[in-house]
Amino acid sequence: MSDFEQSDLDAYLDRIGWKGARRPALETLRGVHLAHALSLPFENLDAVSGRAPSLAPADLLAKMIHGRRGGYCYEHNTLLRLALLALGFGVTPLAGRVVVGADTPESRPRTHAMLQVAVPGDPQPYLADVGFGAAGALLLPVPLITGEEFEGAGRRHRLMPLPNHQGPLEQLELQAYDRRAREWTGQYAFTLEPFAASDLEVFNWYVSTSPRSPFTRRPYLQRTTPDRHLSLDGTQLTETDADGTVTDRKLTDEAEARRVVEEEFGIAVPEGVRLLG
C-alpha cells in the first residue's frame, strides 16, 4: 500500500508534468521516471545546514512538490516509490555502494538508494533511480539484465556482474557510457537484497549528519533538462550539453551563487544557508 492519497498523487504528477496514463504499465513507468528526472533537482542544502531531511510523505510533498526545493537520493527515490505504489506497481527499495573514485566497491558503505520495480504482468523487473546526482545518471529505468546495453533519453547504460566478496548474492554494477572519454564508467554496485524504509532512515541520517559525509561539507546540486545538465559542487559550476560538451566556471560571489541556484537550478535557498561557506 502507498502512503499517497489521491490528491497527493495528483499533485506529484502535476508537478512533474506527467499527463499520460495512470495504469501500472511499462510505458507509465518510463514516462513517470523521465518526467521526474527532468523536473525535480538534486540538492543537499538541508544536510549542509546540519539537518537530516525528513522522508515522511507529507514532508517530501511539502518540500519537493509544493515548495521550490529538490532533494537527494533518499528523498527522490522515496517520493518515486510512493507514487509508483499508488499507481499499482510493485516496488522494493535497494541500496548500493557508489564506486566513482573508489578502489573497490567494498571500500564504500551502502549510501545510495534505488528501486527495483515490478510491472504487473511483466516477468522482467526493472532498476529505477531518479536520485543519482551525476550527468550520466539514469533518465529511464533499465531491465535488471546483465551484459546488455540500454539507451534511453540520449544516455547509455549497462549492468555488469561483479565478484561479491562479502556474501553469496550476485553483485551488479551500473555503468554509464562516457562519450568524451569513450569508455564505460561504474556508478554504483549493489545486490538485489531488499531493504525497508526504516533502513533508508538510518542511511539518510548518517549521510546528512556525519562529518565524514561529503554531503555535509559543501553544496552539491544537479539539474537535468532535455538539452543540458547543470552541476554545482562547492563553488564549481559545470554545464554539460546534450552533445557532451562541458563548460566549467567557478562561483566566487555569494549573491551570484544564490542567483544561479534560484534561477538556473530552480531551488529556493533555505534561510540561513550560505552557498559559498
Image (cartoon, helix red, strand yellow):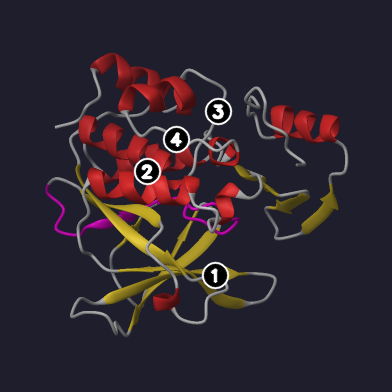
Say which residue appears at 30% left-offset and 14% top-offset.
7
Are the residues at dot 4 and dot 1 in contact (C-beta closer than 8 Å)?
A: no
Which stretch did the figure color magenta? 121-140
Are the residues at dot 3 and dot 1 in contact (C-beta closer than 8 Å)?
A: no
Q: In the rendered image, which residue does mark 3 sit on?
A: 69
Three-letter code, disc 3: Arg
Q: In the rendered image, which residue does mark 1 sit on?
A: 100
How far apart marks 3 and 1 lie (CA) works out to: 26 Å
Three-letter code, disc 4: Pro
Instruction: Indicate whether 31 appears above or below 12.
Output: below
How far apart marks 4 and 2 lie (CA) works out to: 13 Å
Element at badge 2?
Answer: helix
Q: State which mark lies toward you, 3 or 4.
A: 4
Magenta stretch contains residue 224: no
How far apart marks 4 and 1 lie (CA) works out to: 24 Å
Q: Quadrant of residue 183?
A: bottom right
